[in-house]
Image (spheres, helix red, strand yellow):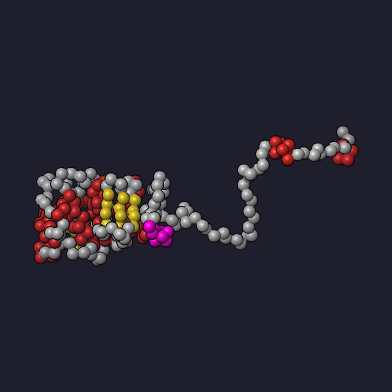
């Protein structure tokens, strides 16, 4: 077939009115995305701080968006304050892989709130840990409550004083092994006597807890604990009988070494 040039075809384009053009094109075209061309070296400013950058790990070293169904952070604080807080929490959790896994799987969230009266709070109803500041010893002790809740120790009759006692004793034992201490939780000579009387065994170049000695003597510290916190009614009372302390499980969560 012999090809014909366009002028030989004698085609003409009809003139269209605006309404005819809109009908032909199916609308004004306002739904089409705007195309912006940037130079190769252009880096646009990021206006939205709530971005899922790889380094925006809020609650867990293996970050997944725990809080995808709601807001995260304290809205009364700046984005940088919240971001720095979660980076520090992430750093803490990276040292305790088993604890980090529990936090992730239980969907426990952390919040910074400098206005709270206590140094830290764990809420089993909302699965949140609120800290007054990012002090690691407080982080550890509130996470102890989270583990207690995970082990179904929370909410049992007459267990509150026992759980608080365990939290503070865990803080002391953790502090001794990291050479940081966690505060004067047991202001009593008996505490020093127990701590120096056989609690630790030297093994492989470090002190580890003598579990047999610890289990034999730890309840003796309860009266010293109550005396130290005599101003706290919730810390008073008696230890429940046949209470399942789960010491070895707790030690494992917080890398407290024992034999």
Q: Main secondary structure of the magenta part?
A: helix
Residue 202 is inside the magenta segment: no
Residue 83 is inside the magenta segment: yes
In the rendered image, which quarter is residue 198 located in?
bottom left
Q: Which residue is drawn at 51% across and 57% down?
A: 47
Question: Does residue 148 lie above or below 183 as drawn?
Answer: above
Q: Residue at x 87, y 37 (%)?
A: 9
Q: What stretch is highlighted in magenta?
A: 76-84
Question: Does residue 256 lie above or below 30 as drawn?
Answer: below
The single residue placed furthest to the top in the displayed view is 1
Give the side of residue 215 with respect to residue 133, left or right: left
Q: Which residue is drawn at 25% across and 65% down?
A: 180
Residue 53 visible (yes or no)? no
Q: Residue at x 76, y 39 (%)?
A: 17
In the rendered image, which quarter is residue 31 located in?
top right
Q: Residue 146, image x and y in percent?
A: 27, 50
Q: Quadrant of the N terminus?
A: top right
Q: Which of 70 and 137 is in front in this view?
A: 70
Q: Residue 86, image x and y in percent?
A: 38, 57
């Amino acid at each position: 077939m012999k090809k014909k040039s366009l002028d030989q075809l004698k085609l003409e384009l009809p003139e269209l009115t605006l309404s005819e053009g809109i009908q032909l094109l199916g609308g004004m075209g306002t739904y089409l995305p705007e195309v912006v061309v940037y130079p190769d070296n252009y880096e646009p400013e990021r206006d939205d701080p709530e971005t899922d950058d790889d380094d925006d790990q809020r609650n867990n070293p293996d970050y997944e968006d725990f809080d995808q169904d709601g807001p995260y952070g304290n809205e009364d604080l700046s984005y940088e304050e919240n971001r720095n807080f979660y980076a520090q929490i992430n750093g803490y959790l990276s040292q305790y892989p088993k604890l980090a896994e529990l936090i992730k799987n239980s969907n426990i969230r952390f919040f910074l709130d400098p206005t709270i009266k206590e140094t830290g709070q764990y809420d089993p109803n909302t699965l949140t840990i609120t800290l007054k500041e990012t002090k690691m010893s407080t982080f550890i002790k509130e996470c102890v409550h989270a583990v207690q809740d995970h082990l179904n120790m929370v909410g049992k009759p007459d267990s509150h004083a026992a759980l608080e006692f365990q939290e503070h004793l865990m803080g002391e034992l953790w502090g001794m092994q990291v050479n940081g201490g966690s505060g004067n939780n047991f202001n009593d000579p008996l505490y020093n006597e127990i701590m120096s009387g056989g609690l630790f065994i030297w093994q492989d170049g470090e002190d580890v807890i003598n579990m047999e000695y610890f289990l034999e003597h730890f309840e003796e510290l309860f009266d010293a604990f109550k005396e130290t916190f005599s101003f706290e009614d919730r810390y008073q009372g008696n230890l429940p009988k046949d209470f399942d302390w789960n010491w070895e499980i707790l030690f494992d969560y917080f890398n407290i070494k024992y034999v």
